[in-house]
Image: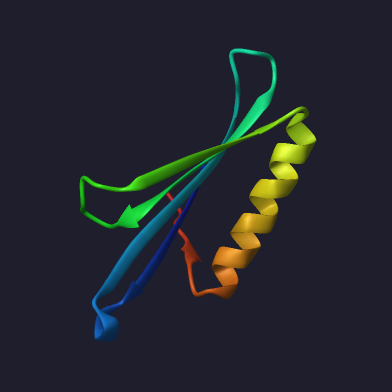
Amino acid sequence: MITLYRVDEDRNMRRFYHLRVERTLFGGWALIREWGRIGSRKGQALEEWFEAAELAEAALQKLESAKRRRGYCLVRG
């Protein structure tokens, strides 16, 4: 799982973005995205299904790059 955070105190912005690839029950692969405000119990989620793990991983890398360009930083730990 990749966890990205974007915090901007001046704009009262505290966001998280989780990305992960998992195998589905039907033998395919899913890219699962979850995002929302840090500390909130509400958030959103989206699943995209792929035929192969390589396609799901490529989509994950593309999304991670896009989020980093928008100011999100990788969380270590």
Q: Residue at x 61, y 31 (%)?
A: 30
Location of residue 16 (image quadrant) = bottom left
Q: Residue at x 64, y 48 (%)?
A: 60
Q: Percent x, y for residue 73? A: 48, 66
Q: Is residue 10 left or right of residue 54?
A: left
Location of residue 24 (image quadrant) = top right
The residue lying furthest to the bottom in this view is 10
Q: Is residue 30 left or right of residue 75?
A: right
Location of residue 57 (image quadrant) = top right
In the image, is residue 62 above or below residue 18? below
In the image, is residue 40 above or below residue 11? above
Task: Give the camera-side residue of 2 and 41.
Answer: 41
Q: Percent x, y for residue 52? A: 78, 29
Q: Is residue 52 left or right of residue 7?
A: right
In the image, is residue 18 above or below residue 51? below
Task: State the scheme by which the image is colored.
Answer: rainbow
Q: Residue at x 68, y 53 (%)?
A: 61
Q: Percent x, y for residue 77? A: 42, 49
Number of numbered markers = 0
Task: Give the camera-side residue of 48 and 70.
Answer: 48
Q: Percent x, y for residue 72? A: 48, 68
Q: Residue at x 62, y 66 (%)?
A: 66
In the image, is residue 11 above or below residue 54? below
